[in-house]
């Protein structure tokens, strides 16, 4: 029996795929990345800068057992298929697996599929290939760039500001937010007035005087005009035009994130998490299947098979007159990979049919993806746009309206668009050609400042400017929030004082590198590396030769951030005590360091006596800042709990009980104490 081993990234994906393949196949998961750059060498970068930026990779903490298990399975297998995600990051993970598991060229192949359905997975084996080293080089170049900038700039920010980190894309996104806030602060509102003729069935706004634009700056000017107006209006023209209203192309990553924010209220992180579940596989009544195609894509392309089946669905469901045409987006000249757009894996799997198997939020997102793809292949809607011009003593008023003449794609997509009928009466039939208004009103207004960025607007701006990649937008947003560089108010980004300080310091010394143009050009260079048109070492060398001198200058130029005094004095030397930042958070120490190395003992929160020694279980923090509970006799005693333990033992296994949320549960077994 020939055993074929398939390695994917996600455990849930492996379960789905295993059901499609025969008994000769075993499907295992790498659970994401297995290796990353070490923190060895110069500046702890894990990169040998002098030796052509050679990376030093180490196994990610906690992955050693998984790798050993995979190695054992590889030895048993006759052939290995690497089936990680169909993008550059997935290609890099496959390369790391190939290298770590010591695979041989003749005994492995790389397969990719854009959707997790039985046909797509089985068909992928017919197009198996070797790892694309150009894609790997592009992804690894991105990783090295981000490591160098992240480590080196973050150290600078920690020394010179209250900030904790900086990044290649993160800092440019933050600059957009800060620049927008400064635009708002400089804005001076201007007064203006509008005058409106109110009729029985519609309203018309003043826009011209003697067929020239008119602006009303104050109430005195408004009153002067009102004094010249009567209540009769002459119909000058009624202009009707038939217009086609086109549907949008199917979703790509950025447009999905934007519309999910605007219409569903989901942030980018939530949208991508839900989309990941829909992609990896949902257990339906008779099958387990991925409901959508791969959700990290820049392409609006749809497969011929999907187009054909959707045209058939449209004809059967709505009639042949609703069949449209394939949408393209020629303006997108910076598409990363030749993937498909985000679409349902089957047009026959309607949102209503799968609703019982989805959470409410999964259903909302799937429904939006489904109808966007369906609408993109339906015929344009047609509207009758009407513009009416009225004259009152040489003052011209305008009224506009729109009637949907043929609903087209709006038959399925109207919930996600703001199209509304505004119907005007048939004014061209009036014999007298004169209308009498009920009243003429005036209203004061003030010009509005630029709007702050919402997540949707910031994603749109980053995409337009070519900053980063859509697959990284969610991470960028979360980082800005977690670092306290921005706050969210009314779903809009507001930079904090720290965020503004970070931006100003970076612009003082790195304006030639931390800017929109440079960041967008770097993305283009990464694209060229992926296409085999650019040397990755040269790209890194050119960047580093600009970056490192600027960094050294910044360390010399920028003043060191003064530590905050606590108001206490050092018990050992009498100097002021100050708050400092360390690897595991803030601590209080002597300002006379390094002459005096006094550190104030932290106030420790004792929970209970340790069950395994004479120590105390105290509240601690992990390297990543997560709270846990461990023995104060560590490392002699390694007793630890993620949830807070209490002085009560489990009736099933005699281990300590812990509190998690509102539940009291055992720290070892599945026992949960009933209320």
Image: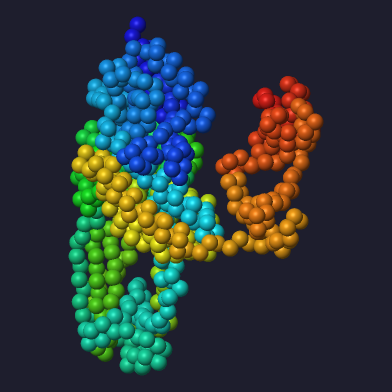
Left or right of 655 on screen, residue 536? left
Percent from the top left, x then y, of residue 250? 29, 45
Percent from the top left, x then y, of residue 395? 27, 86
Rendering colour mode:
rainbow
Q: Is residue 36 something one can see in this rendering?
A: yes
Closer to the camera in the image, 340 or 5: 5
Left or right of 575 on screen, residue 360? left
Quadrant in which the N terminus appears: top left
Q: Is residue 355 something one can see in this rendering?
A: no
Percent from the top left, x then y, of residue 429? 22, 73
Percent from the top left, x then y, of residue 593? 64, 55
Looking at the picture, does residue 381 appear above or below residue 355?
below
Task: State the residue at coordinates (34%, 73%).
Answer: 202
Task: State the residue at coordinates (34%, 57%).
Answer: 513
Closer to the camera in the image, 654 or 652: 654
Q: Indicate the quadrant where residue 438 lies.
A: bottom left
Most extreme residue toward the front is 595
Quadrant in which the C terminus appears: top right
Looking at the picture, does residue 509 appear above or below residue 192?
above
Task: State the residue at coordinates (31%, 35%).
Answer: 136
Most extreme residue toward the top is 1
Looking at the picture, does residue 489 appear above or below residue 615?
below
Left or right of 340 on screen, residue 100? right
């Amino acid at each position: 029996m020939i055993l074929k081993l398939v390695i994917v990234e996600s455990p849930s994906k492996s379960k789905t795929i295993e059901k499609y393949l025969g008994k000769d196949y075993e499907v295992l998961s790498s659970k994401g990345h297995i290796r990353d750059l070490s923190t060895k060498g110069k500046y702890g970068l894990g990169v040998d800068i002098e030796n052509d930026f050679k990376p030093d990779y180490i196994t990610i903490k906690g992955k050693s057992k998984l790798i050993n298990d995979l190695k054992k399975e590889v030895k048993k297998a006759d052939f290995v298929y690497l089936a990680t995600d169909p993008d550059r990051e997935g290609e890099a993970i496959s390369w790391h697996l190939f290298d770590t598991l010591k695979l041989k060229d003749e005994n492995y192949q790389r397969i990719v599929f854009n959707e997790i359905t039985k046909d797509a997975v089985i068909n992928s084996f017919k197009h198996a290939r070797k790892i694309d080293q150009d894609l790997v080089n592009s992804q690894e170049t991105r990783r090295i760039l981000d490591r160098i900038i992240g480590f080196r700039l973050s150290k600078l920010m920690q020394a010179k500001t209250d900030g904790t980190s900086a990044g290649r894309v993160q800092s440019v996104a933050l600059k957009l937010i800060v620049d927008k806030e400064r635009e708002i602060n400089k804005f001076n509102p201007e007064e203006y007035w509008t005058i409106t003729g109110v009729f029985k069935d519609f309203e018309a706004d003043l826009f011209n005087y003697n067929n020239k634009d008119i602006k009303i700056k104050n109430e005195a000017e408004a009153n002067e005009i009102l004094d010249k107006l009567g209540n009769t209006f002459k119909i000058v023209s009624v202009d009707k035009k038939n217009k086609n209203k086109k549907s949008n192309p199917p979703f790509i990553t950025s447009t999905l994130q934007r519309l999910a924010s605007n219409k569903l209220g989901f942030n980018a992180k939530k949208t991508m998490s839900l989309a990941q579940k829909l992609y990896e596989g949902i257990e339906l009544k008779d099958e387990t299947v991925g409901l959508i195609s791969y959700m990290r894509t820049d392409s609006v392309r749809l497969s011929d098979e999907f187009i054909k089946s959707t045209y058939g669905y449209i004809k059967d469901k709505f009639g042949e007159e609703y069949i449209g045409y394939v949408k393209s987006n020629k303006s997108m000249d910076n598409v990363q990979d030749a993937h498909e757009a985000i679409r349902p894996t089957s047009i026959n799997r309607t949102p209503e049919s799968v609703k019982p198997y989805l959470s409410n939020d999964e259903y909302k997102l799937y429904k939006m993806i489904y109808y966007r793809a369906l609408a993109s292949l339906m015929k344009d809607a047609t509207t009758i746009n009407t513009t009416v011009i009225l004259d009152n003593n040489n003052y011209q008023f305008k009224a506009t309206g729109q009637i949907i003449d043929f609903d087209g794609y709006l038959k399925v997509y109207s919930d996600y668009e703001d199209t509304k009928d505004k119907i005007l009466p048939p004014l061209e039939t009036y014999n007298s050609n004169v209308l009498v208004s009920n009243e003429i009103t005036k209203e004061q207004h003030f010009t509005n400042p630029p709007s702050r960025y919402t997540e949707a607007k910031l994603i749109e701006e980053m995409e337009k400017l070519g900053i980063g990649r859509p697959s990284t937008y969610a991470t960028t947003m979360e980082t800005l929030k977690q670092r306290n560089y921005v706050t969210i108010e009314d779903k809009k980004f507001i930079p904090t004082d720290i965020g503004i300080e970070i931006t100003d310091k970076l612009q003082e010394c790195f304006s030639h590198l931390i800017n929109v143009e440079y960041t967008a050009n770097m993305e283009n260079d990464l694209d060229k590396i992926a296409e085999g048109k650019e040397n990755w070492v040269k790209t890194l060398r050119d960047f580093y030769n600009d970056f490192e001198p600027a960094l050294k200058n910044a360390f010399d130029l920028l003043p060191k951030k003064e530590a905050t005094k606590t108001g206490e004095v050092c018990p050992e030397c009498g100097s002021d005590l100050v708050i400092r930042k360390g690897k595991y958070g803030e601590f209080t120490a002597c300002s006379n360091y390094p002459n005096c190395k006094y550190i104030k003992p932290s106030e420790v929160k004792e929970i209970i006596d340790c069950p395994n020694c004479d120590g105390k279980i105290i509240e601690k923090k992990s390297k990543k800042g997560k709270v846990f509970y461990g023995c104060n006799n560590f490392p002699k005693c390694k007793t630890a709990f993620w949830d807070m333990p209490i002085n009560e033992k489990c009736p099933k296994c005699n281990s300590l009980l812990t509190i998690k949320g509102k539940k009291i549960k055992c720290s070892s077994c599945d026992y949960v104490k009933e209320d």
